[in-house]
Amino acid sequence: MFFCVTFLILYSFMECQSEQLQVVGPKAPLVAVTGEDLVLPCFIKPNTNALNMTVEWLRVELGVLFVHSYRSHEDQNENQAQAYKGRTSLFKEELQKGNASLKLSALQVSDAGKYVCHIEDKSWIQEVPVYVTVAVLGSHPVITVESYDNSGGINLVCESRGWNPEPQVQWLDREQVILTAEDTQIHRDTEGFSVKSHITVFDYSDSNRFYCRLQQKHHMIETHIIINSKIFHAWKTIVGISVLALLFAVGLILTAVICHKKGHSHG
Ligand SMILES: *[C@@H]1O[C@H](CO)[C@@H](O)[C@H](O)[C@H]1NC(C)=O
Ligand SMILES: *[C@@H]1O[C@H](CO)[C@@H](O)[C@H](O)[C@H]1NC(C)=O
C-alpha cells in the first residue's frame, strides 16, 4: 500500500513536471539574407537545464535530414547532412538554461524551409517547427539618364537584378521625400526578380539629387544621381537646337522636292 501511494505520488509528480515543460519556437518565420548567420530559437519553458537531454535539429520535408544532434552531453554529428557540415552549433552555456537555439552560419538559399527542434528527456518528448525564409539581395542599383522630356524634365531609369523575394522600389529627392515613379516593372527570371523603374524628374534646385532605393524587410540598398540644373538647361538648349535642325532639314527637303518638281516640269 505504501509503495503504491509513493508510486502514484511520484508518477503524478513526473507527469505534472513534464506537462509543465513546454518547448517554444519563434512565433513567425525567420527571414535572413544569404551569407549571414542565423539563430533558430528554441527553448524550454520554464527554464530547465537541458544539458542531460537530447536535442535534435531536423529537416523533415523530403525524408529526415539531420541538421544538428546533441546527445549524452555532446554533439553527435555523424549523421549530419552534408550541407550542414561545419555550419551548426548550439549555445552550450544557454543549454543549461533550457535554451536549445541553433546557430546556422553562412546561410544558403537551400537552407530555406521547415526545421524541427526536437527535445527529449527520459520521460517526455516535444517538438516545435521553425520556418526559415532566405532572402537574396540583388545587384547594386544603377540609375541612367534615358531621355529628355518635352515638359522640361529628365527621364531616369533605375535597374537592379537578382532579388528574392521581390524588393520595394522607391524614388526620393534630396530631402528624402518620396517621388512617384511612372512605372516600375518587376520580372522574375532565373536569377530572381529584376527591377526596372522609370521616373521623370524636374529641376528643383542648384544640385538635384535623386535616390533610387530598393528595400527588402530590414535590408536596403540605394544609389543616387546628381543632376546639376545646368544639365536641365543644357538639355533644353540641345532640344531647342535639335528642333531648329529638324525644321531646317524639313525645309531643305521641301526645297529639294519643289526644285525637283520644277526641274521635271521644265524638262
Ligand atoms: C545530468 O547527468 C549527470 C550524470 O549523468 C548527473 O550527475 C547530473 O546530476 C544530471 N543533471 C541534471 C540537471 O539532471
Ligand atoms: C538563446 O540563446 C541565443 C544565443 O545566445 C539568444 O540569442 C536567445 O535570445 C536565447 N533565448 C532565450 C529565450 O534566452
Image (spheres, rainbow, N blue to C red):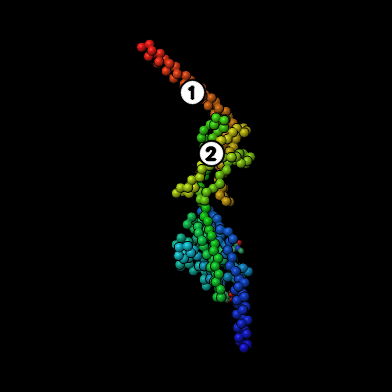
Residue flagged by tag 1: what amino acid is it? Leu
In this orientation, does residue 77 appear? yes
- Pick the quarter of the image with the C terminus: top left
Badge 2 crowding class, 10 Å Cα cut-off, few under 14, some 14 to 19, many 20 or more, is many
Q: Are marks 2 and 1 in contact (CB under 8 Å)?
A: no
Mark 2: which secondary structure?
strand
Residue corresponding to mark 1: 246
Badge 1 crowding class, 10 Å Cα cut-off, few under 14, some 14 to 19, many 20 or more, is few
Quarter of the rendering containing residue 151: top right
Q: Residue furthest front?
A: 265
The front one of 103 and 169 is 169
Q: Residue furthest left?
A: 267
Q: State how far apart marks 2 and 1 are (Cα).
A: 28 Å
Q: Position of residue 150 (x, y in %)?
A: 55, 30
Q: Position of residue 192 (x, y in %)?
A: 48, 49
Q: Measuring 55% from the left and 71% from the top, which residue is drawn there?
A: 125
Say the numbered circle drawn on residue 167. none
For residue 175, side relative to residue 197 (left or right): right
Residue flagged by tag 2: what amino acid is it? His
Q: Position of residue 203 (x, y in %)?
A: 60, 32
The front one of 89 and 255 is 255
Mark 1: which secondary structure?
helix
Residue corresponding to mark 2: 198
Q: Residue furthest top?
A: 266
The quarter of the picture showing ligand 2:
bottom right
Q: Measuring 60% from the left and 76% from the top, which residue is drawn there?
A: 15
